[in-house]
Amino acid sequence: MGFHTEASRDSSIIARLDRITVWPYRPSLLWIIGIGFLVAFFDITNVGFGLPVFSKQLHISATAAAVPITASLLGYILGSYLNSSLADVLGRRAGIMYATALFTVGSLATVFTMNIAWLISWRFITGMGIGAEIAAIATYVGEMSPAPVRGRYTGWANVFSFGGFAVVPFVALALVPNFSWGWRGMFLVGALAGFSMLGVRNIPESPRWLLSKGRADEAERIVSEAEAVAERKTGMSLPPPAEGVGEERSERFPTGDLLRPPYVARLFLLLIIWIFLYLSDYAWLGLAPTLLVDKGFSLANSIVFLLVTGIGYPIGALIAAWLGDRFERKYTIALVTLVWSLGLAAVGLFPSPTVIYIAGFILSTALALFFPLMYALTAESFPTRARASGVSLTDGVGHVGGALAPIIALAAFSWAGVVSGFASAFLYMAVTGFIGAVLIPFGVAATRKSVEVVSQ
């Protein structure tokens, strides 16, 4: 009887949260986690803008030029998994705090690096923090959001993250071409993320995670506060909750739950999708300045191209927030990823300034549109007791593709030679993105459904 009473109470608490149709927390919560997202995404791409300069200052050969990017992405994989396992055991708030500390230390140390060995080491540490932060925040937003608005507020959180992408070219243009230490200054900006930890300490814990640990009293208090906020915002009483589905509890190590049906099939499919998406997008994010310079554009002009086209990042994230819950997410993601692939092919085949501006804007918009929805789809595919681990083992381990992306893109560039190398590198990005788009519709249908319903 005790077990059934607890399960009934758990499902009731979840149903009360999922009947809410607005963001039921104080606005500062989105700002706090958004800033963490912003700086994490800033740190993903800043190394690409500094690469043409620090490769000369630190005497890095062309062959080794991609190693710092690869090191960061390998760190992403390890940090994402270790920290996500911690977040599944100790809580989402702890996971976000540890992640922020990691990439703050890594970025600050990179500022003072004097040789390639230390650069690779500190970029690895920074990558650990970035991977951990993205997995922890994606999981947290998905669990805190009521079912009817989960896609919308995952999109809103990612307005900040892709704002980080958009900010990088502005900072790079101001620092890199004008100062010998400019690339170090970019990493110092990334280290400022540490200040966001002051706010993270005060965010509420995920009620879904609390329920998975048998802490129903704490979960109910947080949901009750959310209900009160929602009623103040809407000026109306909330409707009666529908019949809810409780979260299964487990004493197993989180990864063990994911290696059982139905999660193991979802795990494998999402991992393959993320690998192909990252094989495509990390080549663009990490090597676009270098490839454009090799094509004959100046470093300043290349940065200006990416600065202007980067306006598409916040626009795409805003569209994702608007579209997030209107259509079935997986089909929206697949369609936008196809547009992404066509944009890459256009840049590779017709690399004029006009095409780069237009296609680059489309690429930025598409990237910022499909990634928030893909994060939401990934998080809602797994149970609360192992959700952060599920995100890390798909998105995180999927960064194997990101680690290989610059190496394969540069190999395609070198293999095709001076005349066709640029086109070959971009066609490689287009084809890998297309494969990811074809696989996405095989994922779960999760839009406007309780994550407990989807995960079971």
Image (cartoon, rainbow, N blue to C red):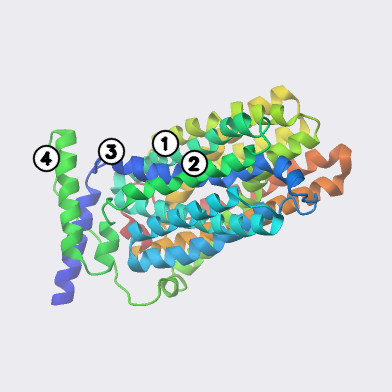
Of the image marks 3 and 1, the number of the one nearer the N terminus:
3
Residue tagged 1: 323
Q: Secondary structure at mark 3?
A: loop
How far apart, in angstroms, are the residues tagged by discs 1 and 4?
27 Å
User: Helix, strand or loop at disc 4?
Assistant: loop
The foreground one among 298 and 350 is 298
Q: Amino acid at mark 1?
A: Leu
Question: Disc 3 and disc 2: Cα gap in Å?
Answer: 27 Å
Select label 3 or label 1 by which is in front.
3
Mark closest to the chain's N terminus, 1 or 4 = 4
Towards the viewer: 97 or 207 = 97
Tag 2 residue? 332
Per the image, the residue denoted by label 4 is 237
Q: CA distance from mark 3 to mark 1?
A: 21 Å
Residue type pointed to by label 3: Pro
Pointer 1 with pointer 4, Cβ within 8 A? no
CB contact under 8 Å: marks 2 and 4: no
